[in-house]
Amino acid sequence: LPKLTSFLIPGTTPGGAALDHARTVVRRAERFFCRLAEQEPVHDVDRRYLNRLSDYAFMLMRLEEA
């Protein structure tokens, strides 16, 4: 993908809006996971997975909106 040079507003297409919503849900899960990690032992690979999943949803949204 080309480098971002401006602010991206998702929702130009229904698919892009759905992917941005999915990214938002995954980011919320990631924040919940980080709070959980303060209280319980967790595997760091799970946190990395959630982070990569949100990045993947963002990349797919950029492809959809292009």
Image (tube, rainbow, N blue to C red):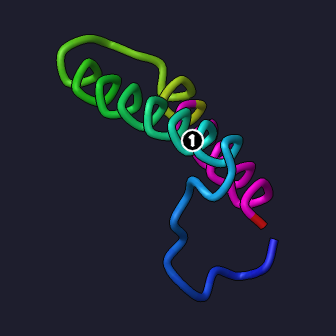
Q: Which x, y percent locates residue 32?
A: 29, 24
Q: Which quadrant would the N terminus be assigned to in this image?
A: bottom right
Name which quarter of the figure residue 30 lies in: top left
Name which quarter of the figure residue 20 lies in: top right
Tell me the residue at 66%/42% (across/down): 14
Q: Is residue 51 left or right of residue 24?
A: right
- Under mark 1, the amino acid is Ser
Report the magenta residues as a range: 50-65
Residue 57 or 14: which is nearer the viewer?
Answer: 14
Label 1 element class: helix
Tell me the residue at 42%/37% (across/down): 27
Q: Which x, y percent locates residue 62?
A: 70, 60
Q: Residue furthest bottom?
A: 5
Q: Which x, y percent locates residue 48?
A: 55, 36
Secondary structure mostly seen in the magenta stretch? helix
Q: Is residue 51 left or right of residue 38?
A: right
Instruction: Write down the residue under mark 1.
Output: 54
Tell me the residue at 78%/79% (across/down): 2
Residue neighbourhood size for the residue with mark 1, other residues' Cα within 10 Å, grouped as few (<14), some (14–19), many (≥20): many
